[in-house]
Image (tube, rainbow, N blue to C red):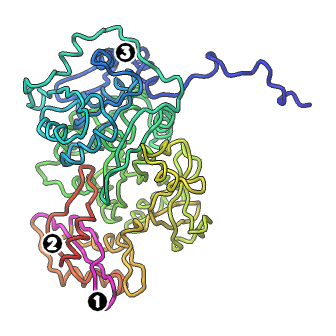
């Protein structure tokens, strides 16, 4: 009998097994990088020793409020220090962090608070009216509201609620962090956008978040002490877990409360920012910034972009400004990004449209994922020909635990041992995926499938187009036809006929929009275009 069949004395114990948790990153950083700058918010600065101590006091303050292990602590905060601290302090108190989108309506916020059974709600002073309105709508016990004023941004305490900083001043400075006993314990609760009904509560584990931080460092080619700008809202997939990642490298988190082109360019120039993430609309913002908003780049700035397939035209333009964009892809259910468009040596000679098209691919699985591929209805991988379509499915450590209080929905999306994304894509050689569309966004015109992404990509090459979205418009003859909603760049003009003619020069006739509507596109707080609103507008017209 081989010796490996008898493992007596090789049992797991405290010496050789510790539950994985991103909390470990900050505990280590407080020792290894004690004096290094951990976080910046305007004139405010925290070293890692100070950051760690502040987080401990916040955890102690929560415990003093009666927060116990397993309780939910919600936040209504923009990308400010209180939100970053809460990412460590809430789990350090043994609780589950529920970051809520600050742009939701009161009814939806009330639903989230009630569904998640939040015990405490930490609110930025700017969003107190939203919090009060939501709490008044909850059918059941409302959470205790704690106010987090942001004096640096001009938002002072109202005087109507306990102030977070005061509670922290009175908290036990020696509060002992409650580390997970099992890495499968819940770390965070994030809600989907809920565009077709009530949002679903997505539950993250300590293990998944820890491995996301490790995989991201590799994929983003990071070294010690990166300076990172918080553009992705921390209420969206916990900012793709980047806040939990920064202490791993002794990095500096630069908070960005209001996302503007000027704020981004200023942070790059004044704070030495070298990394940021953002939806394609952020790339568009940087490309179309006015001259007075821009600052010269003295080095390459790395950007992870995700949230929707960016137009190849936008990718091509932003590279010329000095940014290196890596396309990534993921969902709320996957802690954020789980694929990367890993650049291949054979692509170095590509230029212009060809180079931008390669960069627009969503790519291959990141290191912490086991498998990401495209399968047909029979759960067979589609041919790697760049044209055969199927659904993106995946499995790995950065797939959610499941949907809170929704076992049927969890079982449906985990059918066959994979998470089913609902995104339609093709496979290229080497297993690179490229999103064709969301299943619900495919336009079926005269029996032919039209990808809204393809039509949008063509329109984005027009020099007057700043942003566009294409949806289905009912049609008596064809069933559905493409309808384009377009934002025009400042100072530019173009007519509907000119845009349709431009599309016909790049696309088959049946793929071209039959109607163009000009105006500002509705967007979520993370920069995604709200196509459900545009579909309703197209149907109404």
**Badge 3 or badge 2: first in the primary sequence:** 3
Splitting the image into 4 quarters, where does residue 188 fall?
top left
Question: Please, is residue 231 above or below residue 66 in the view?
Answer: below
Q: Nearer the viewer, mark 3 or mark 2?
A: 2
Residue 246 is situated, as x and y percent measured from the top left of the image, at 38, 30
The residue drawn where x is 17% and y is 27% is 147
Give, as a single range, the part of the protein colored magenta: 466-490
- Residue holding disc 1: 476
Q: Nearer the viewer, mark 3 or mark 1?
A: 1
- Taking depth in this image into account, of 63 and 229 the one nearest to the observer is 63
**Badge 1 or badge 2: first in the primary sequence:** 1
Mark carried by residue 34:
3
Task: Say if mark 3 contacts mark 1, CB within 8 Å.
Answer: no
Residue 20 is situated, as x and y percent measured from the top left of the image, at 52, 28
Tell me the CA gap for discs 3 and 1. Answer: 68 Å
Whether 199 is among the magenta residues is no
Which SS type dominates the magenta stretch? strand
């Amino acid at each position: 009998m081989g010796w490996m069949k008898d493992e007596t004395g090789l049992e797991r114990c405290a010496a050789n097994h510790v539950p994985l948790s991103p909390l470990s990153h900050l505990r280590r950083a407080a020792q290894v990088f004690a004096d290094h700058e951990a976080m910046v918010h305007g004139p405010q600065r925290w070293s890692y020793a100070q950051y760690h101590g502040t987080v401990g006091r916040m955890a102690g303050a929560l415990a003093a409020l009666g927060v116990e292990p397993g309780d939910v602590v919600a936040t209504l905060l923009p990308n400010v220090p209180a939100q970053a601290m809460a990412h460590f302090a809430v789990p350090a108190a043994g609780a589950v962090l529920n970051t809520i989108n600050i742009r939701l309506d009161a009814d939806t916020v009330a639903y989230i608070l009630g569904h998640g059974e939040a015990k405490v709600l930490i609110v930025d002073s700017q969003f107190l009216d939203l919090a009060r309105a939501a709490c008044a709508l909850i059918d059941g016990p409302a959470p205790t509201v704690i106010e987090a004023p942001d004096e640096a941004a001009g938002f002072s305490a109202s005087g109507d609620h306990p102030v977070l900083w005061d509670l922290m001043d009175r908290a036990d400075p020696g509060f002992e962090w409650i580390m997970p006993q099992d890495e499968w314990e819940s770390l965070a609760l994030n809600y989907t956008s809920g565009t077709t009904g009530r949002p679903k509560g997505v539950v993250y584990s300590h293990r998944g978040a820890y491995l996301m931080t490790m995989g991201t460092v590799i994929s983003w080619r990071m070294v010690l002490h990166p300076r990172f700008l918080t553009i992705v809202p921390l209420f969206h997939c916990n900012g793709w877990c980047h806040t939990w990642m920064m202490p791993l490298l002794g990095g500096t988190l630069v908070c960005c409360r209001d996302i503007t082109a000027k704020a981004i360019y200023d942070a790059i120039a004044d704070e030495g920012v070298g990394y940021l993430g953002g939806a394609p609309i952020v790339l568009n913002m940087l490309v179309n910034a006015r001259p007075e908003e821009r600052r010269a780049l003295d080095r390459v700035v790395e950007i992870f972009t995700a949230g929707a397939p960016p137009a190849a035209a936008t990718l091509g333009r932003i590279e010329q400004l000095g940014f290196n964009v890596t396309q990534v892809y993921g969902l709320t259910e996957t802690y954020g990004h789980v694929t990367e468009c890993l650049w291949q040596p054979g692509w170095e000679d590509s230029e212009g449209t060809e180079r931008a098209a390669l960069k627009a691919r969503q790519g291959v699985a990141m290191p912490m994922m086991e498998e990401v591929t495209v399968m047909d209805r029979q759960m067979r991988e589609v041919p790697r020909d760049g044209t055969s379509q199927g659904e993106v499915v995946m499995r790995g450590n950065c797939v959610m635990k499941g949907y809170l209080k929704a076992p049927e929905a969890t079982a449906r999306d985990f059918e066959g041992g994979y998470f089913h994304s609902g995104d339609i894509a093709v496979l290229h050689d080497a297993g690179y995926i490229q999103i064709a569309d969301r299943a619900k966004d495919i336009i079926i015109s005269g029996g032919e499938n039209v990808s809204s992404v393809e039509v949008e990509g063509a329109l984005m090459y027009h020099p007057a187009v700043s942003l566009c979205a294409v949806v289905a418009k009912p049609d008596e003859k064809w069933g559905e036809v493409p309808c384009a909603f377009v934002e025009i760049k400042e100072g530019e003009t173009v007519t509907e006929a000119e845009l349709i003619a431009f599309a016909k020069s790049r696309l088959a006739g049946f793929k071209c929009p039959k109607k163009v509507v000009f105006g500002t596109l509705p967007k979520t707080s993370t920069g995604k275009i709200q196509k459900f609103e545009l579909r309703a507008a197209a149907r109404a017209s």
